[in-house]
Image (cartoon, rainbow, N blue to C red):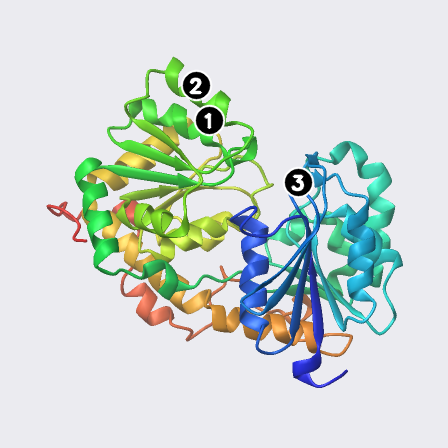
Amino acid sequence: MSAARRIKVVQAYKVYPPDVEGGIPSVIRNIVNALSDKCECHVVVARTAGRYVKEIINGVKVHRIASLGTLWSLPISLSCPFALFRQVRDADVLALHEPYPLGSIVAAFGLKRSTRLVVHWHSNIVKQRVLLPLLRPLQERMLKRADAIVIADGSLMEEFQALAPHRDKVRIIPFSVDVQRWSWRDQDQLGAIAALRRLHPRLIVGVGRLVGYKGFSVLVEAMASVDGHLVLCGAGPDDRELLRQIRERGLSDRITLAGSLPFKQLRSLIQAADVFVLPSVTTAETFGLVQLEAMACGVPVVNTLLPTAVPHICRDGFEGLSVPPGDAGALATAIKMLLDDPMLASRLGKAGRVRAQTCFTTEKFAERIWHCYVSERGGSEGSIARGDAGPHELVPGEAAASAMSLVVDARHDRSPPAEARSA
């Protein structure tokens, strides 16, 4: 393979920021930002609508392919596979982010033998489930061609049954968060946080696309018995239905649908929050990167006990509280527990920041990803076969002592509430 600075790595997926923020697009941005000084980075994605655009963002060449829109969360674009093929003809590495059937076509049929294929398997196909009989042979051919398959947590292997025959290729590389970026506070930020806390003394925040699997309808139902104000940030097809539910339940004075917010506003909102909630209800939520961002801000999280990485990232009684998915009553109880006990909330929030700083650093993430991209074919560090610890399996000695000094079991904490949490 050519010298490190000449290696060409192509990232392929449906969309990329700022067209869509959060989730997989944000993971791709984290990867290219971390590796841009090591290689020539290209990102090939579709536009949400419109003609082809080529941009250079922070030294990364972003190719946004013409699209007529989306159908079943897929770009309506016949040119996407051809544009990706043109980019990978001279690429050293194709990093394909699944699920993305249009990219799978190129990975399965359009790569030279010398091009290393790394498949980032983020989730199973959900919305295109009716097409699975047609897509499964394509997926299998692509996985056979793959040199490495990246997942974010070891617990996901049970959910990702398609990966079972290729277990020897699987690498566990947890996502990362830029703790400094999310925890940064200047005078303007401190002023915004103080204003938000004056406006909403018991502030609950949720962030994500307004789609069914995120469980926001359950959170709205839970708010009927919570004395506090919920701000939901994000856009999506369920916005009208959520607004209707809020009005029917008479909760317009307790819930604000804020839409998509610029980063600085979103950061201020999360930092001002007393509780962050990730109420996802299906296994489509495989990791919950946004809860990691809340942890970086030092905010306690309420998440759900999904059979995915979600409850392993922010752990029940350590950095937050976990409840059964779809249980509005349990969700309300957990939120009220944190609102009513600021000392407990502060303790869990501090432990969350420690966990983010020690287990999910951008430096560690970049090192593992780079090794996966440039290593020779075959086994490498991080493979399941070698027994690497996932993020919920703390490596002995890896900041465990400092983290545990801040942690108590939330179910047995009896500390008296503090007057307030300082900004």
Identify the residue under disc 1: 217
Q: Is residue 170 visible?
A: yes
User: Disc 2 versus disc 1: distance between alpha carbons?
Assistant: 8 Å
Q: Amino acid at mark 3?
A: Ala
* 319 up-or-down from 48: above or below: below
Splitting the image into 4 quarters, where does residue 200 fall? top left
Q: Residues within 10 Å of mark 1 (few under 14, many from 20)?
A: many
User: Disc 2 versus disc 3: distance between alpha carbons?
Assistant: 30 Å
Q: Element under label 1?
A: helix
Image point 78% across, 31% down: which residue? Answer: 130
Identify the residue under disc 2: 245
Residue 161: x %, y % from top left: 73, 48
User: Disc 1 versus disc 3: distance between alpha carbons?
Assistant: 29 Å
Residue 350: x %, y % from top left: 28, 58
Q: Is residue 362 left or right of residue 415?
A: right
Mark before the other along the chain sequence, 2 or 1: 1
Mark closer to the observer (1, 3)? 3
Q: Looking at the rendered structure, which numbered label has been put on residue 49? A: 3
Residue at the extreme top:
248
Residue 334: x %, y % from top left: 33, 37
Q: Residues within 10 Å of mark 3 (few under 14, many from 20)?
A: some
Mark closer to the observer (2, 1)? 2
Q: Looking at the rendered structure, which numbered label has been put on residue 331? A: none
Residue at the extreme left:
419
